[in-house]
Image (spheres, helix red, strand yellow):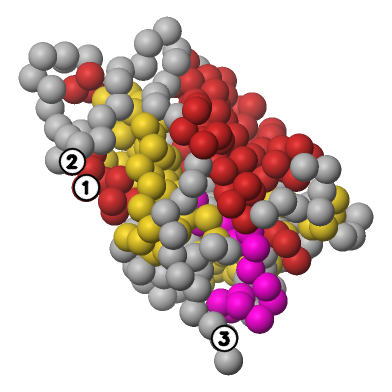
Amino acid sequence: MMIALKAATPQLPRTTAVADHVVAVDETDSTNALAAQMIGDGSLTLPDHQDGELAVAVVAADRQTAGRGRNGHKWISQPGRCSTMSYAVRIPRAIATDESVNGWLQMIAGLVTLDALNGMIEEYGAAPNQSDCFLELKWPNDVFCHGLKLGGLLSELVIPPLSGTDADADDDVVIVFGVGLNLALGACRLPTPQSTSLQLHVSGLPSFGEMRDAVAERQVEGFRERLAKFIADPKGQAESLREEMKAVCWARGRQVEAHFTDGTTLTGEAIGLNEDASLILRTQDGTDHTVRTADVGVL
């Protein structure tokens, strides 16, 4: 019989040292929902970005009772085993709403997450159990390892309260990046046959609490650095990100099936990303299709 795990307030000393604001609770329905609520009622504020330096706030919980993924999917996590964090960053409204570049915000979240996980593994001298074990991103929002889902990301736009005094600030919005990661789940606790956990692929990892804090610290720094560069030069960074994604895009070069919200599907080879971060799917007749919103699975 599986024993229920008790939630405890996350201890995040390293993350607290680098973030502008950290909210940690033992349990909430969704860290993204809690972050949005606090931003909306003014209890979580982010200062204006000065000289390219972005403020990053963190909302963390040990247990989510209603974790959310894209397209209404549920995110199932377990306390003391899964990291559930949301990172809030204030960015110009013009970039967040520009469909020619805003798709890269989700890709940035994925790349920040890979950097954080790989950096933590290297810091603690841990090592993959197999030589071909490396982390990838399944477009548009999943962290994969060996073709299995290790984590998921969900980005949401939140309108902060009007300041009434700072016109430039009122032209900003807040993007909340929710990141759920299976770090220390045993095989018997995995929620689905398609999911996995970092400890099943990497040996020599530290305790769950240390892992969670070390990864979150790196994510704060990664969001701050990557988003500042993106805000300064969205088009230029989009091209750089497109090149960077070639090495870590799990779907690229595979036969996949895209499932759309209207119930239709499209099958073909994922050949890369467009300039706006949408997926290029080439069907058997040689036609290239643009996929912007869909669940993508390998065949």
Crowding around mark 1 (Cα neighbors within 10 Å: few <14, some 14 to 19, many 20+) is some
**Dots 2, 1 in contact, CB < 8 A:** yes
Residue placed furthest toward the right: 131
In the image, which residues are magenta? 178-192
Give the Cα separation between the discs numbered 3 and 1. Answer: 34 Å
Q: Which residue is mark 2?
A: 40
Magenta segment: does it hold 183? yes
Q: Which residue is mark 1?
A: 37
* Relative height, residue 247 to residue 231 (above, below): below
Q: Is residue 138 left or right of residue 53?
A: right
Q: Which mark is residue 238?
A: none
Q: Secondary structure at mark 2?
A: helix
Q: Amino acid at mark 2?
A: Gly
Mark with earlier residue (3, 2) = 3
Magenta segment: does it hold 89? no
Residue at 77% of width from left, 42% of height from top?
124
Q: Is residue 159 left or right of residue 56?
A: left
Give the Cα separation between the discs numbered 2 and 1. Answer: 5 Å
Q: Amino acid at mark 3?
A: Met
* Relative height, residue 238 to residue 142 (above, below): above
Q: Which mark is residue 2?
A: 3
